[in-house]
Amino acid sequence: YQPAITATGVFVPPEAISNDDLVAAFNAYADRVNAENAAAIEAGEMAAIPHSSSEFIVKASGIENRYVMDRSGVLDPARMYPNLRQRSDDEPGIMAEMALAACEAALSKAGRKGDEVDLVICAASNMERAYPAVAIEIQKLLGAGGFAFDMNVACSSATFGIQAAADMIRSGSVRRALVVNPEITSGHLEWRDRDCHFIFGDVATATLIERAEDAEHGFLIRSTRCATEFSNAIRNNNGFLRRNRPDGMQDRRDMQFMQEGRKVFKEVLPLVCTHIGAHLTEETVPADSLKRLWLHQANKTMNDFIGRKVLGRDPEPGEQPNILQEFANTSSAGSIIAFDRFSSDLNPGDKGLICSFGAGYSVGSVIVERY
Ligand code: CO8
């Protein structure tokens, strides 16, 4: 069977944070900590926390805004992380709730119902719990049949999930799949670190994958390629083994997102460009035949560089759309938001490439063709 993406859905959280709001909260936090530690700073025992700035954020990343599930906790200088209500085990978890909204948006675009789905993959950077799988909770809320499982490949979770689902549809073991990416990045971002506090936003995306023959139009999944190479340059040490550490469950910096941004930038770019080049060559798809690149949304300079390298020229306006100015980095969901917003104008026969990259390191590419 030929697998195809027949619809995508995006759940946008209800609250937004502009760079100016974010910087005001961060600077108030920095002033507070600096005042509390004035003597230590004066004695040279501690460095003062420097201010952040909106100008730096836009220049370094292209990000202007992000959406979050809770603004008040993130912007409270005495807290600096989201205030998310602890839910009882009998109510849907926050990831399942976000995922459900994105799945319903995708199903409604395709005119499908939840009970027609027989595979749910919840693919995201972090799971709110270890088990039962969040995907199985989503399967239940959708009334879907078949089976469901979680997977985590950080920023590449969506493309790796699409490859897994597409291969199962190709083999006939599954008829209709939802790959869903609820990214609650605000929970694991370190909002107190000016090097990274601006990078991420919350969102959920869903991709419906069916047999092409089951839908009048969509995007054929022509080919997928995934690759990984271990790196510690992006890491989060939170996890259930934290209890075994001598420092117990303290508020430790390494339990939130950590990265060596410059290193990531330098190492990931060649990895991505080589990966895409090799994938296109193996599939005899010339780069200049691609009508669109839907890239992972981490950093504008990074995407501009990849676009130029892959196409061998400056991308035309609209050829490589960015959504990070509005959403920030939404980890695995970024390339799918770009696809959702900027794909309906393609004509039958037009080809494009979805590509993700990030922690792991990981790279995933999907060649699609409109039909
Ligand atoms: N305001 C003002 N100045 C600042 C700020 C700030 N907020 N932050 C840093 N500066 C200063 C620095 O201290 C530095 O000063 P100096 O030159 O005196 O040392 C100067 O500005 C330059 O800083 P950088 O070198 O850090 O700035 P860059 O231009 O390199 O930009 C970026 C930083 C934007 C982080 C850039 O390096 C980048 O985008 N790198 C790639 C990162 C990336 O794509 N990572 C993807 C990882 S995401 C992923 O895989 C998913 C993980 C799971 C999700 C986790 C969700 C929480």
Image (cartoon, rainbow, N blue to C red):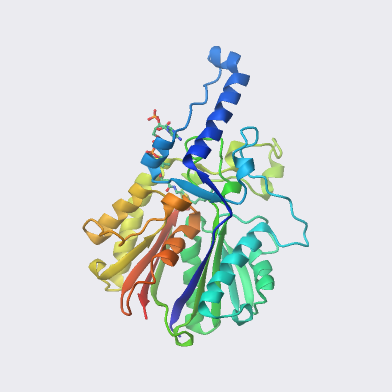
Q: Is residue 173 above or below residue 50?
A: below
Q: How many marks?
A: 0
Mark yes or no: residue 192 visible: yes
Where ligand 1 lies, by quadrant?
top left
> Quick check: 367 above or below 189?
below
Figure quadrant of residue 138: bottom right
Across and down, in percent, residue 207 comes to 50, 70
Position of the C terminus, as image quadrant, is bottom left
Image-based side of 224 in relation to 242, left or right: left
Q: Toward which corner of the image does residue 149 lie, by quadrant?
A: bottom right
Tell me which residue sits at (66%, 64%) in the image: 133
Comparing 228 with 202, the one in front is 202
Q: Is residue 316 left or right of residue 264?
A: left
On the question of residue 359 being in view, the answer is: no
Question: Residue at position x 55%, y 72% from top?
Answer: 178
Quarter of the rendering occupied by the N terminus:
bottom left
Query: Whole-percent x and y of residue 315?
Result: 26, 58
Residue at the (51%, 55%) spot, across then down? 154
**Residue at the far bottom in the pictured view:** 213
User: Residue 236's spot in the image, x, y percent?
Assistant: 56, 46
Residue closest to the eye, 233 or 201: 201
Where residue 127 appears, as percent x and y from the top left, is 62, 56
Quarter of the image for residue 177 reads bottom right
Identified at 44% across, 83% down, the residue is: 212
